[in-house]
Image (cartoon, grey):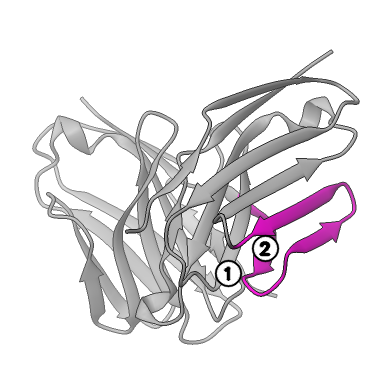
Protein backbone atom coordinates (compact mmCIF):
# COMPACT_ATOMS: atom_id res chain seq x y z
CA UNK A 1 0.00 0.00 0.00
CA UNK A 2 1.02 3.58 -0.51
CA UNK A 3 2.26 5.70 2.36
CA UNK A 4 3.55 9.23 2.66
CA UNK A 5 6.03 10.39 5.27
CA UNK A 6 6.65 13.97 6.21
CA UNK A 7 9.08 15.26 8.80
CA UNK A 8 9.70 16.84 11.15
CA UNK A 9 6.29 17.21 12.75
CA UNK A 10 7.18 20.49 14.44
CA UNK A 11 10.02 22.92 13.94
CA UNK A 12 11.01 26.19 15.59
CA UNK A 13 13.59 28.16 13.65
CA UNK A 14 15.08 31.65 14.06
CA UNK A 15 14.63 34.31 11.41
CA UNK A 16 17.37 34.09 8.81
CA UNK A 17 18.09 30.40 9.33
CA UNK A 18 17.79 27.81 6.54
CA UNK A 19 14.96 25.34 6.17
CA UNK A 20 14.66 21.83 4.79
CA UNK A 21 11.43 19.85 5.02
CA UNK A 22 11.35 16.40 3.53
CA UNK A 23 8.53 14.31 2.14
CA UNK A 24 8.78 10.76 0.81
CA UNK A 25 6.23 8.47 -0.73
CA UNK A 26 6.29 4.68 -0.71
CA UNK A 27 4.41 2.11 -2.72
CA UNK A 28 3.93 4.02 -5.96
CA UNK A 29 5.93 5.25 -8.92
CA UNK A 30 5.97 8.60 -10.69
CA UNK A 31 3.43 10.31 -8.45
CA UNK A 32 2.50 13.95 -8.71
CA UNK A 33 3.84 15.67 -5.59
CA UNK A 34 2.67 18.87 -3.93
CA UNK A 35 3.62 21.28 -1.16
CA UNK A 36 0.83 23.28 0.46
CA UNK A 37 0.92 25.87 3.23
CA UNK A 38 -1.99 26.33 5.58
CA UNK A 39 -1.97 29.64 7.41
CA UNK A 40 -4.25 30.63 10.29
CA UNK A 41 -5.60 27.09 10.52
CA UNK A 42 -7.73 27.35 7.44
CA UNK A 43 -7.00 28.11 3.78
CA UNK A 44 -4.66 25.89 1.77
CA UNK A 45 -2.25 27.59 -0.57
CA UNK A 46 -0.49 25.52 -3.21
CA UNK A 47 3.22 26.40 -3.16
CA UNK A 48 4.82 23.91 -5.54
CA UNK A 49 3.93 20.84 -7.52
CA UNK A 50 6.00 18.32 -9.43
CA UNK A 51 5.01 15.84 -12.13
CA UNK A 52 8.43 14.18 -12.32
CA UNK A 53 12.05 14.14 -11.17
CA UNK A 54 13.59 17.60 -11.46
CA UNK A 55 10.29 19.13 -12.64
CA UNK A 56 9.07 21.82 -10.27
CA UNK A 57 6.28 24.31 -10.84
CA UNK A 58 5.93 27.26 -8.52
CA UNK A 59 2.49 28.63 -7.91
CA UNK A 60 3.26 31.78 -5.96
CA UNK A 61 6.35 33.98 -5.62
CA UNK A 62 7.91 33.46 -2.25
CA UNK A 63 10.95 32.90 -0.10
CA UNK A 64 10.84 29.13 -0.55
CA UNK A 65 12.05 26.64 -3.15
CA UNK A 66 11.36 22.99 -3.85
CA UNK A 67 13.34 20.13 -5.32
CA UNK A 68 12.63 16.58 -6.38
CA UNK A 69 15.96 14.74 -6.46
CA UNK A 70 14.33 11.31 -6.62
CA UNK A 71 11.02 10.01 -7.92
CA UNK A 72 9.42 9.72 -4.50
CA UNK A 73 11.19 12.50 -2.62
CA UNK A 74 10.06 16.10 -2.45
CA UNK A 75 11.96 18.72 -0.46
CA UNK A 76 10.90 22.21 0.57
CA UNK A 77 13.73 24.61 1.33
CA UNK A 78 14.63 28.14 2.21
CA UNK A 79 18.02 29.82 2.50
CA UNK A 80 16.80 32.44 4.99
CA UNK A 81 13.50 32.12 6.81
CA UNK A 82 11.18 35.06 7.35
CA UNK A 83 8.62 35.48 10.11
CA UNK A 84 5.91 35.23 7.45
CA UNK A 85 7.07 31.70 6.58
CA UNK A 86 5.46 30.39 9.76
CA UNK A 87 2.60 28.02 9.10
CA UNK A 88 1.52 24.44 8.70
CA UNK A 89 3.16 22.78 5.69
CA UNK A 90 1.53 19.82 4.03
CA UNK A 91 2.98 17.47 1.47
CA UNK A 92 0.67 15.41 -0.75
CA UNK A 93 0.82 12.99 -3.64
CA UNK A 94 -1.67 11.99 -6.32
CA UNK A 95 -2.05 9.72 -9.28
CA UNK A 96 -4.97 9.83 -11.67
CA UNK A 97 -8.27 11.16 -10.39
CA UNK A 98 -8.24 9.63 -6.95
CA UNK A 99 -7.52 12.86 -5.14
CA UNK A 100 -4.60 13.63 -2.94
CA UNK A 101 -3.12 11.70 -0.05
CA UNK A 102 -1.67 14.11 2.47
CA UNK A 103 1.19 13.75 4.90
CA UNK A 104 0.67 14.55 8.56
CA UNK A 105 2.11 18.04 8.20
CA UNK A 106 4.93 20.12 9.68
CA UNK A 107 4.18 22.99 12.04
CA UNK A 108 6.86 25.63 11.37
CA UNK A 109 7.28 28.54 13.76
CA UNK A 110 9.81 31.19 12.81
CA UNK A 111 10.90 33.26 15.81
CA UNK B 1 -11.94 31.43 -12.49
CA UNK B 2 -11.18 28.77 -9.91
CA UNK B 3 -12.92 29.99 -6.76
CA UNK B 4 -14.32 27.46 -4.33
CA UNK B 5 -16.41 28.82 -1.50
CA UNK B 6 -17.75 27.36 1.72
CA UNK B 7 -19.41 28.75 4.80
CA UNK B 8 -16.95 29.04 7.68
CA UNK B 9 -18.87 27.43 10.52
CA UNK B 10 -21.60 24.89 11.17
CA UNK B 11 -22.90 23.75 14.53
CA UNK B 12 -25.16 20.71 14.99
CA UNK B 13 -26.40 18.54 17.83
CA UNK B 14 -25.13 14.99 18.18
CA UNK B 15 -27.40 12.59 16.32
CA UNK B 16 -28.67 15.22 13.87
CA UNK B 17 -27.67 15.38 10.21
CA UNK B 18 -25.04 17.87 9.06
CA UNK B 19 -25.05 19.41 5.60
CA UNK B 20 -21.91 21.20 4.46
CA UNK B 21 -22.22 23.21 1.27
CA UNK B 22 -19.71 24.25 -1.36
CA UNK B 23 -19.93 26.29 -4.54
CA UNK B 24 -17.38 26.39 -7.31
CA UNK B 25 -17.00 28.39 -10.48
CA UNK B 26 -15.02 26.20 -12.87
CA UNK B 27 -17.44 24.27 -15.09
CA UNK B 28 -14.60 22.11 -16.47
CA UNK B 29 -14.04 20.37 -13.12
CA UNK B 30 -13.67 16.62 -13.51
CA UNK B 31 -13.66 15.42 -9.92
CA UNK B 32 -14.92 16.99 -6.72
CA UNK B 33 -13.68 15.93 -3.31
CA UNK B 34 -14.43 16.20 0.36
CA UNK B 35 -11.58 16.19 2.86
CA UNK B 36 -11.64 16.17 6.67
CA UNK B 37 -8.97 17.81 8.82
CA UNK B 38 -8.76 17.16 12.54
CA UNK B 39 -6.77 19.59 14.73
CA UNK B 40 -3.05 19.58 14.01
CA UNK B 41 -3.32 16.84 11.40
CA UNK B 42 -3.15 16.50 7.65
CA UNK B 43 -6.17 16.25 5.41
CA UNK B 44 -7.97 12.94 5.06
CA UNK B 45 -9.88 12.13 1.89
CA UNK B 46 -13.47 11.29 2.81
CA UNK B 47 -15.09 10.79 -0.56
CA UNK B 48 -15.13 12.08 -4.10
CA UNK B 49 -17.55 12.27 -6.99
CA UNK B 50 -16.99 12.33 -10.70
CA UNK B 51 -18.53 15.32 -12.43
CA UNK B 52 -20.97 13.22 -14.48
CA UNK B 53 -22.61 11.86 -11.32
CA UNK B 54 -25.18 13.66 -9.21
CA UNK B 55 -25.09 11.58 -6.05
CA UNK B 56 -22.80 9.25 -4.19
CA UNK B 57 -23.48 7.51 -0.89
CA UNK B 58 -20.91 5.92 1.38
CA UNK B 59 -22.22 4.75 4.77
CA UNK B 60 -23.12 7.92 6.73
CA UNK B 61 -21.88 10.22 3.96
CA UNK B 62 -23.97 11.42 1.03
CA UNK B 63 -22.52 13.69 -1.64
CA UNK B 64 -24.86 15.65 -3.90
CA UNK B 65 -23.64 17.44 -6.99
CA UNK B 66 -25.68 20.01 -8.91
CA UNK B 67 -23.50 20.66 -11.89
CA UNK B 68 -25.85 23.24 -13.38
CA UNK B 69 -25.62 25.39 -10.25
CA UNK B 70 -22.01 24.34 -9.52
CA UNK B 71 -23.06 23.31 -6.04
CA UNK B 72 -21.65 20.42 -4.02
CA UNK B 73 -22.86 19.25 -0.62
CA UNK B 74 -21.80 16.71 1.97
CA UNK B 75 -24.43 15.27 4.26
CA UNK B 76 -23.32 13.43 7.39
CA UNK B 77 -26.08 11.34 8.92
CA UNK B 78 -26.25 10.74 12.69
CA UNK B 79 -23.43 13.22 13.36
CA UNK B 80 -21.12 12.22 16.21
CA UNK B 81 -18.68 14.23 18.32
CA UNK B 82 -15.85 12.53 16.43
CA UNK B 83 -17.09 14.25 13.27
CA UNK B 84 -16.02 17.63 14.68
CA UNK B 85 -13.34 18.87 12.29
CA UNK B 86 -12.75 21.21 9.36
CA UNK B 87 -14.21 19.96 6.09
CA UNK B 88 -12.76 21.06 2.77
CA UNK B 89 -14.26 20.66 -0.64
CA UNK B 90 -11.93 20.64 -3.62
CA UNK B 91 -12.16 20.48 -7.39
CA UNK B 92 -9.76 19.21 -10.01
CA UNK B 93 -9.43 19.37 -13.74
CA UNK B 94 -7.82 16.96 -16.16
CA UNK B 95 -4.18 17.65 -16.93
CA UNK B 96 -1.99 20.38 -15.46
CA UNK B 97 -0.47 18.17 -12.78
CA UNK B 98 -3.87 17.24 -11.37
CA UNK B 99 -3.90 20.34 -9.18
CA UNK B 100 -6.71 20.67 -6.68
CA UNK B 101 -8.34 23.95 -5.76
CA UNK B 102 -9.54 23.86 -2.17
CA UNK B 103 -12.36 25.72 -0.52
CA UNK B 104 -11.78 27.76 2.61
CA UNK B 105 -13.02 24.95 4.85
CA UNK B 106 -16.08 24.62 7.09
CA UNK B 107 -15.55 24.17 10.82
CA UNK B 108 -18.11 21.61 12.02
CA UNK B 109 -18.84 21.64 15.72
CA UNK B 110 -20.92 18.83 17.16
CA UNK B 111 -22.62 19.63 20.46
CA UNK B 112 -24.01 17.19 22.98
Look at the image and say whether residue B76 sits in the magenta stretch. no
The image quadrant that residue A46 belongs to is: bottom left
Q: Disc 2 on helix, strand or loop?
A: strand
Residue that label 2 marks? B48
> Height in image: B94 above or below B58?
below
Above-or-below relation of B80 to B58 = above
Give me the chain letter of mark 2.
B
Query: What residue is drawn where x is 84% and y is 32%?
Result: B17
CA gap, disc 2 and disc 1: 7 Å
**Residue B61: where, in percent of width, then height?**
81, 49
Q: Residue at x 87, y 39 (%)?
A: B77
Rendered location of residue B52, percent (x, y): 66, 75
The image position of residue A80, as x and y in percent, is 9, 45
Q: Which residue is mark 1?
A: B31
Q: Which residues are magenta?
A: B44-67
Quarter of the image with the N terminus of chain A in it: bottom right
Q: In what quadrant of the picture does the C terminus of chain A appear?
A: top left
Which chain hosts label 1?
B
Q: Main secondary structure of the magenta part?
A: strand
Asked if residue A106 is positioned above or below residue B93 in the image, the reply reads: above
How many numbered discs, if any? 2
Q: Are marks 2 and 1 in contact (CB under 8 Å)?
A: yes
Q: Residue at x 46, y 51 (%)?
A: B102
Q: Nearer the viewer, residue B17 or B96?
A: B17
Q: Which residue appears at 54% of the width and 56% of the height?
A: B70
Amino acid sequence: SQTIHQWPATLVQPVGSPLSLECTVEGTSNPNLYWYRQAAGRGLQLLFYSVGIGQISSEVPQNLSASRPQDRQFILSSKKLLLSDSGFYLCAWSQGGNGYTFGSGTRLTVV
Amino acid sequence: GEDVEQSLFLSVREGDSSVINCTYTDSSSTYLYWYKQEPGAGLQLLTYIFSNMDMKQDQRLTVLLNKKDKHLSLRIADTQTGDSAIYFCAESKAGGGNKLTFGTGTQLKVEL
